[in-house]
Amino acid sequence: MSDLILTGASRGIGHALALALAGPGGRRLVLVARDETRLSTLVADVERKGGRALSVPGDLSTLEGARALGRRLVEVAEPGATLVHNAGVWPSRRVLTPDGLELAFAVNHLAPLAMQQPLLDAGHLRRIMLVSAGLLVKGRFDADRTPTGEDFSSIRTYCDTKLCLALAMRDVAAAHPELDVVVLHPGVVRTDLGARTGPLGWLLSLVKRGWEAPETCGARLARILARERWSPPGDARWMMEEQEQPWPAPTDDERLRQAVRQTTARWLARP
Ligand SMILES: NC(=O)c1ccc[n+]([C@@H]2O[C@H](COP(=O)([O-])OP(=O)(O)OC[C@H]3O[C@@H](n4cnc5c(N)ncnc54)[C@H](OP(=O)(O)O)[C@@H]3O)[C@@H](O)[C@H]2O)c1
């Protein structure tokens, strides 16, 4: 069976998905995140369940880091691989990366594209699953301000970046009819995503108690990964949890798509 590359494997949904996929006869898991210790522990846990896994530590907060990660993945992953873009951040305040980008715009949007490009160039990918968010419907995009976070909002910026990568992934599917591409909302899951400090953090942790466990979501994503096919050639499909649905309205806005396309290309063209 072909490899499965999973970003954001160290915690939350990605960690649970890796364990859900682990087992005798399963595909080899190529596990990506920054936290090497957690990845090593996860590799050992996958092997204990009879599966195979490899840790590839990497940082998606800089474009160079993302590109280096992509090149490393070309070396280790076998052709025909499935790539699950799952890593993500929900910052509470505007943080700039060394590239001068707003952190969520870098990690949630540009870096996955920079990382996957070497894999596409090498013809190593057969399927791409993007763990997006239903909240993308709240997203907006200002070509001059969103990349650098000048329009930062502790809630909306996350939605903006989820919208941007979903749009970009539709373009990737159109440009690569050999790929099978799905973009999905994974569920509302009790993880560290968007953790806050102080009274708001305390309130949020209370609310999260009612959300589903990462294991439930991991099992759901594993079932979706087991499907024979997600999309027709040249098209990506949108799913809310396990249900295929029409693409949300903002992702069909042609002017928005064009703005995101041009701005993304401009930033990715930087050395
Ligand atoms: N939880 C929900 O209810 C929910 C709902 C809708 C969508 N989602 C989406 O689901 C995905 C997973 O979220 P989660 O809830 O599991 O969040 P999480 O528990 O906070 O996990 C985030 C993962 O992303 C990785 N990551 C963060 N920054 C990174 C960086 N600079 N470089 C490389 N990896 C980085 C983290 O690993 P390291 O820190 O080790 O690098 C971690 O493994 C995200 O894309 C999120 O937007 C979640």
Image (cartoon, rainbow, N blue to C red):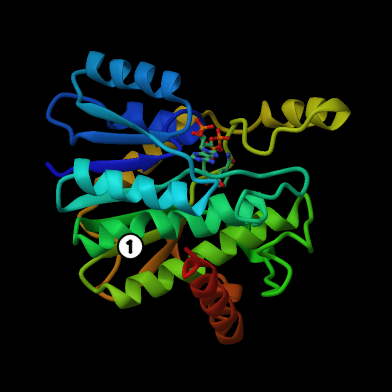
Q: Which of 78 and 160 is in front in this view?
A: 78
The percent coordinates of residue 229 (x first, y second) are 23, 59
The percent coordinates of residue 167 (x first, y second) are 50, 70
Residue 216 visible in image: yes
Above or below: residue 125 compared with residue 169: above
Residue under the point 76% across and 43% down? 92
Q: Nearer the viewer, residue 203 or 87?
A: 87
Crowdedness of circle 1 by 10 Å Cα count: few (<14), some, many (20+)? many
Task: Judge from the rendering whether residue 225 lies leftward or rightward of residue 207; answer left or right.
Answer: left
Q: Nearer the viewer, residue 110 or 155?
A: 110
Residue farthest toward the bottom in the current orientation of the protein: 255
Residue at mark 1: C-beta within 8 A of ligand 1:
no
Residue 242 visible in image: no
The percent coordinates of residue 203 (x first, y second) are 81, 29
The residue singled out by tag 1 in the image is 181
The percent coordinates of residue 246 (x first, y second) are 48, 71
Above or below: residue 66 compared with residue 136: above
Task: Judge from the rendering whether residue 145 lies leftward or rightward of residue 75; answer left or right.
Answer: right
User: Residue flagged by tag 1: what amino acid is it?
Assistant: Val
Task: Judge from the rendering whether residue 4 lies leftward or rightward of residue 129; answer left or right.
Answer: left
Q: To which quarter of the image does residue 156 belong?
A: bottom right
Residue under the point 57% across and 58% down? 162
Above or below: residue 177 compared with residue 79: below
**Tag 1's secondary structure?**
strand
Residue under the point 24% across and 74% down? 177
Q: To which quarter of the image does residue 89 belong?
A: top right
Q: Nearer the viewer, residue 102 or 131?
A: 102
Residue under the point 26% across and 50% down? 82
Residue farthest toward the front in the current orientation of the protein: 271
